[in-house]
Image (spheres, rainbow, N blue to C red):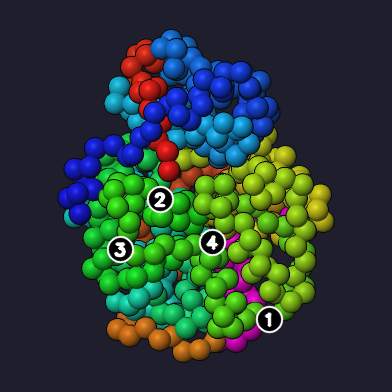
Amino acid sequence: MSEVRQRQEPRTTDAGSLGIQACYQCGRCTGLCPLARVDSGYSPRRVLSRACQGDSPDGIQSDSLWSCLTCGLCQQHCPMSVAYPEFVKQARASAAGHDLEPPCSHGGALQNLMKLMTRPELRQKRLDWVTDDLQTSRQGSHLYFVGCLPYFDVFFAKLGLGQLGIASSTVRLLNAAGIAPVLLERERCCGHDLLWEGQVEDFRKLAAINLQQIQEAGARTVVTSCAECARTLKRDYADLLGKPLPFEVKHLAELLDEKVAAGQLSFGALEEKVTYQDPCRLGRHLGIYDAPRRLLGSVEGLQLREMPHSRSNAICCGTSCWTGCDRRSRAIQRDRLSSAAATGAEVLVTACPKCAVHFRCSMYQEGYIEEGAVQLQDLAVLLSRAIADEGPAPRDSSPRQPSKTSSKTAPSEGQPSGGAEASPKKSGEEPCRRKKKTGISELACSSVTAD
């Protein structure tokens, strides 16, 4: 995978072709931006305007560049289709080249973990969650990319989400659909957060390790239960390679939707009222809106109650890349949780593990857990509860010997597991490392990454 490391920058296109000058005359982005709604001092239009004018205002000197949630709502409604999230990604990469990094939540522990995983020699205990009832393979056509769930389960244990339940539920659903997925013992973080924080070189290292392992496993389809992993594997890995991937990437919702349509998977009944949170990476970034809803609709007795802002107009979970977790994030999350509760739903379903973490943390601080107004559940966990029967026997060969049940996953050998656990009652931030001042005029404003 040396070609991943050697490739210079993602494909770029001239900024003028994206209508950035028209952005100065509109301001629709600022009117729609979830962050601007709770912070009148933030304006996507202002950040873009000042950056491209070569000034050195709050585009870099304050937190404006790092505050953007990159949710894509502005681009969704921009009359000129300005790729503002991609501009932010490029600007952050330039800022990182000047030794500037964002304020990191949880003391930067998660960022340090991602960088630690760039080491090829790192050994992990990623599969202790695989129990005897789950059927997996060492080689096969379908590979389940687990992502950072084993680490989230440790870091956010106090939130009581049980994020490894998403992983076991995913395998159980795949088994019911006749698939015994390959699991990678040396899998790394997909690198989503590092890429969107401007740490491009570290992202390339993670991508190289993951791509090599996936190809060695012989997988033709990579399935992920994380919206951010889906976006990263589908788009950003291909961009780094500069050519189509040698395998197909599907979010779990896409694959299960196909299996239900083909009559290869069915669900029983669940008498519940639910509402669905569209993850930004799955929805606006990848355009996947219908598959999760069709799956929910295939569960007898399940009532889907939509929030006013849903699908392409959905409001995000308020935090991105484990940065910017502050009062503004809480305000966005509080409003979204209130909107979910107002539908009369008992369960807020999402297809992104991070959405669950951010909402649960806000619920913990606001006291919603005690009130029990609305519960959180991942799509995979909910569907796993509704499996009608065991389904056809998995067809993949080369079975893996499952690991014994473990009460707690130890993320990596020689590394602390419980010590990095984050307290949800305190979300202070600190820079990842010491920053130095620089002007914004050196940013590459003449080009913006486009998909």
Q: Is residue 150 above or below residue 256?
A: above
| C-alpha span from label 4 to label 3 | 33 Å
Q: Residues within 10 Å of mark 2 (few under 14, many from 20)?
A: some
Q: Nearer the viewer, mark 1 or mark 3?
A: 3
Residue in the image at 55% along x and 83% along y: 264
| C-alpha span from label 1 to label 2 | 35 Å
| C-alpha span from label 4 to label 2 | 29 Å
Q: Is residue 203 left or right of residue 360?
A: left
Q: Amino acid at mark 2?
A: Arg
Quadrant containing the N terminus is bottom left
Mark number, residue 235: 2
The answer to the question of whether label 1 and label 3 lie on touching residues, with beta carbons closer than 8 A, is no
Q: Nearer the viewer, mark 4 or mark 1?
A: 1
Q: Quick one: SS at disc 3?
A: loop
Q: Residues within 10 Å of mark 4 (few under 14, many from 20)?
A: some
Q: Which residue is mark 1?
A: 268
Give the magenta part as a residue range.
Answer: 373-390
- Residue 324 in the image: state x and y as whole percent: 52, 32
Q: Quadrant of residue 9?
A: top left
Q: Report whether residue 320 is seen.
A: yes
Mark number, residue 162: 4
Q: Amino acid at mark 4?
A: Gly
Q: Which residue is mark 3?
A: 246
Which sits earlier in the primary sequence, circle 1 or circle 2?
2
Q: Quadrant of residue 446?
A: top left
Q: Nearer the viewer, mark 4 or mark 3?
A: 3
Looking at this view, is 292 or 370 the one in front?
A: 292
The answer to the question of whether label 4 and label 2 lie on touching residues, with beta carbons closer than 8 A, is no
